[in-house]
Image (tube, rainbow, N blue to C red):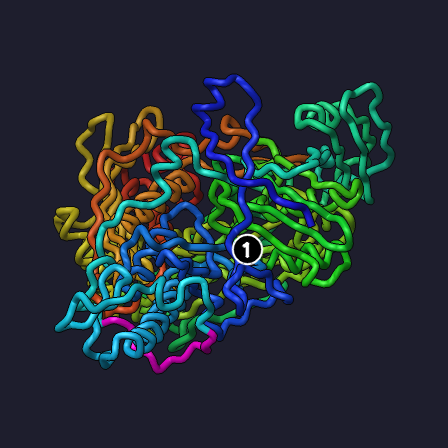
């Protein structure tokens, strides 16, 4: 295992002043305390006992608290929320709490971060552990102070006797540097929320100052002794096979060229030397495999005709076929949603040190605990020989390129027996990251003589978002493994809309299509923020809007009359009220102005959270450009730990999902992906953000369970914008993204 260097406080500003080389090192994350009070590595560092209080919490001699959690920070401020939870339960100042995360040897395995579960599972675990630690410490203090526990009070980690405040003892004096040596129990009650003074408050994020000053340590800043640099040479066309390699000569610093089947990489002393070597390496490849579609149109046509791999019925009530056949007014529409890239702010980076029969990994993804298993599988070594350190990356929101960079670094490090850093470049990150899967969704519906929906049939066809796992678990999950001929185990993930409309004859079914021919290419599919959510809700909420328009009904009222869940109803009402929604049918009456304005609404539940979004848009009839001027969001995720953090998360959800709705689409032909940079894969920029975002938080009460917020607000955005475009122009957009060309085409068709 590689020795880590000490942590330096060397800022980017210092670097610019010195005009020298930027070398950022880092410290060994704190480890659990041994029985003698001294820091000690576990004999089984890959197995952190989940039922031991010491696995979650330790207190130093100075009274500072170190809490460990099996979640990681993906940019939404969850670290600050964890600090609030621990500080609240222990009755210590927020500044005394440090959160450790992402080191597989010293933090409990909670599966990493995903599905908006950080607060739901990580927060709950920390709350329970901190509450038990407080009770344990009060027991110790009772003995030391000679007073019953119920007569003791705690303030900033100091326990005192109620009627004798000068009689006190600190947490540090009680246990500092020692183990609790107790098992977790569910018999200890957490604090009464009525007594909260830290949780629920808008505490500033702890990571922002260092990010603003440029001293925050990201995965790209990691340096280890004797480290080399690697780059991977990808097949130039999809499905191409390596025929031969001619090693470049006279490239300073080139250490080795590595290839195994279709995996090809170079290793050099310096990063630029590795870049140059990769560019000058002469590799001969076979022609492209032409079994992949050659355009978006061909893709959607192929998806309609592909054999079905697996199907799932999500809901089936009444007799849908009979109801559609016998209805007087029936409607049908198809919606299409494309491949989308994660397009993270920066491409992936990872460092691997494979030596002496083990591996140490530094990476910036969401699930270090799973990645260690994939590394062990790739190397053919026991999982206990692998240690993964997590460092913040450029954001991920699903299964981006972070895991794949690990696979690259591991293979290159193994070839030279030294640490190797692999930094992907922009074209790698956009073209080769796993993609959010495309969908083709057909909806059929009917209205009765009262204008209510009497029949509803939702049928989706999609590629599985878990063609590769949500977090690499096997060697075949890595792109490197796939280029070596390995296949991921994969799983079928179905695309079913999450709405809960009450319709007498209703059926929802999803078909997963075979897509293994995409393995080893940039069109393999995986989780992208809110997997399948934007795609399926785009279809269901657009179609609900179409039915409302056909019935001559207001879009809000029409939805409400078909809902029964009070939380569904509440978010729709709250969003409409805050937006100043005035009831009327859509589309709005045209006024002949070159800029048409409109509003649209969409809603969706997600894993116990509920969101309704009103989008207000301007549509330039001549250019086809769409600008969202305002979002109004009603958000119900139960009790909120940090309102400021939640508001920032919701805003980020809206802007990213707006970008996906208006701009993002992976372009490709029969041989290669054409979306390789910000020009060929445009995203929203600062000039295109809305003028206002209004957020209404519902059910923010201590008696409501805290649910996820990292993804729910992503879900309704595309549909809300589509419905607003229809309200503004009378033109219905059924293929995302809503580019100017598609808007103009819809306007021409409308005319």
Q: Disc count in the image?
A: 1
Q: Residue at x 75, y 36 (%)?
A: 265
Magenta run includes residue 188: yes
Residue 612 is left or right of residue 179, and the answer is: left
Magenta run includes residue 111: no
For the record, the magenta segment spans 181-191
Image x and y of residue 240, in percent: 77, 39
Examine the rendered structure and indicate whether residue 409 appears above or below residue 326.
above
Residue wearing tag 1: 103
As helix, strand or loop, the secondary structure at mark 1 comes to: loop
Q: Residue at x 49, y 50 (%)?
A: 528
**Quarter where residue 376 is shown:** bottom right
Image x and y of residue 600, in percent: 25, 46
Q: Residue at x 18, y 65 (%)?
A: 166
Q: Is residue 550 visible?
A: no
Q: Residue at x 45, y 62 (%)?
A: 177
Q: Nearer the viewer, residue 550 or 261?
A: 261
Q: Nearer the viewer, residue 666 or 684?
A: 684
């Amino acid at each position: 295992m590689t020795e880590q260097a000490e942590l330096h406080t060397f800022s980017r500003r210092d670097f610019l002043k010195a005009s020298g080389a930027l070398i950022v090192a880092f410290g060994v994350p704190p480890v659990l305390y041994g029985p003698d009070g001294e820091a000690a590595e576990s004999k089984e560092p890959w197995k952190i006992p989940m039922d031991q209080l010491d696995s979650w919490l330790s207190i130093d001699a100075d009274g500072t608290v170190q809490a460990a959690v099996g979640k990681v920070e993906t940019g939404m401020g969850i670290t600050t929320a964890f600090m609030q939870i621990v500080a609240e339960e222990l009755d210590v100042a927020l500044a005394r709490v440090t959160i450790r995360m992402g080191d597989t040897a010293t933090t409990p395995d909670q599966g990493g971060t995903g599905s908006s579960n950080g607060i739901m599972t990580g927060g709950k675990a920390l709350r329970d552990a901190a509450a038990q630690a407080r009770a344990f410490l009060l027991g110790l203090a009772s003995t030391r102070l000679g007073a019953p526990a119920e007569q003791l009070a705690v303030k900033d980690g100091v326990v005192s006797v109620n009627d004798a405040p000068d009689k006190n003892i600190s947490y540090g004096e009680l246990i500092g540097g020692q183990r609790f040596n107790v098992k977790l129990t569910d018999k200890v009650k957490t604090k009464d929320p009525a007594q909260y003074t830290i949780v629920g408050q808008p505490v500033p994020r702890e990571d922002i100052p260092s990010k603003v000053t440029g001293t925050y340590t990201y995965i790209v800043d990691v340096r280890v002794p004797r480290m080399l640099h690697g780059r991977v040479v990808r097949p130039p066309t999809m499905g191409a096979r390596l025929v031969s390699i001619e090693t470049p000569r006279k490239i300073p610093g080139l250490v080795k060229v590595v290839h195994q089947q279709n995996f090809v990489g170079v290793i050099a002393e310096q990063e630029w030397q590795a870049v140059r070597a990769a560019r000058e390496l002469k590799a001969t490849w076979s022609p492209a495999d032409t079994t992949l579609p050659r355009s978006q149109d061909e893709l959607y046509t192929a998806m309609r005709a592909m054999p079905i791999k697996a199907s799932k019925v999500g809901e089936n009530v009444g007799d849908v076929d009979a109801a559609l056949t016998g209805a007087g007014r029936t409607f049908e529409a198809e919606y299409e949603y494309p491949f989308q890239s994660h397009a993270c702010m920066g491409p992936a980076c990872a460092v691997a040190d494979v030596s002496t029969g083990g591996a140490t990994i530094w990476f910036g993804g969401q699930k270090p605990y799973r990645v260690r298993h994939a590394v062990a599988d790739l190397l053919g070594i026991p999982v206990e020989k692998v240690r993964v350190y997590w460092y913040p990356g450029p954001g991920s929101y699903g299964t981006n390129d972070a895991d794949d960079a690990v696979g690259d670094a591991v293979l290159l490090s193994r070839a030279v027996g030294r640490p190797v850093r692999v930094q992907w470049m922009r074209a790698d990150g956009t073209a080769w990251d796993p993609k959010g899967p495309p969908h083709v969704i057909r909806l059929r519906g009917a209205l009765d003589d009262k204008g209510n929906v009497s029949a509803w049939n939702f049928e989706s066809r999609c590629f599985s978002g878990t063609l590769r796992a949500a977090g690499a678990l096997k060697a075949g999950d890595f792109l490197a493994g796939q280029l070596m001929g390995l296949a991921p185990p994969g799983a079928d993930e179905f695309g079913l809309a999450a709405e809960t409309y009450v319709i007498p004859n209703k059926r929802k079914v999803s078909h997963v299509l075979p897509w293994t021919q995409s393995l080893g290419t940039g069109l393999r599919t995986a989780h992208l923020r809110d997997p399948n959510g934007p795609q399926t809700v785009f279809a269901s909420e657009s179609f609900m809007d179409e039915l409302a328009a056909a019935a001559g009904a207001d879009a809000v009222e029409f939805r409400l009359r078909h809902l029964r869940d009070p939380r569904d109803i509440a978010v729709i009402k709250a969003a409409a009220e805050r937006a100043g929604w005035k009831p009327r049918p859509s589309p709005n009456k045209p006024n002949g102005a070159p800029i048409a304005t409109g509003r649209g609404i969409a809603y969706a539940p997600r894993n116990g959270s509920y969101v309704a979004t009103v989008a207000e848009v301007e549509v330039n009839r001549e250019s086809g450009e769409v600008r969202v001027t305002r979002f109004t969001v009603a958000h119900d995720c139960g009790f909120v730990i940090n309102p400021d953090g939640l508001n920032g998360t919701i805003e980020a959800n809206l802007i990213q999902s707006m970008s996906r709705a208006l701009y993002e689409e992976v372009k490709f032909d029969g041989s290669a992906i054409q979306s390789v940079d910000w020009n060929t894969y445009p995203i929203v920029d600062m000039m295109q953000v809305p003028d206002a975002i209004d957020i209404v938080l519902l059910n923010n009460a201590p008696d409501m369970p805290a649910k996820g917020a990292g993804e729910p607000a992503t879900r309704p955005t595309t549909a809300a914008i589509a419905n607003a475009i229809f309200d503004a122009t009378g033109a219905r957009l059924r293929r995302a993204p809503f580019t100017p060309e598609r808007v103009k085409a819809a306007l021409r068709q409308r005319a």
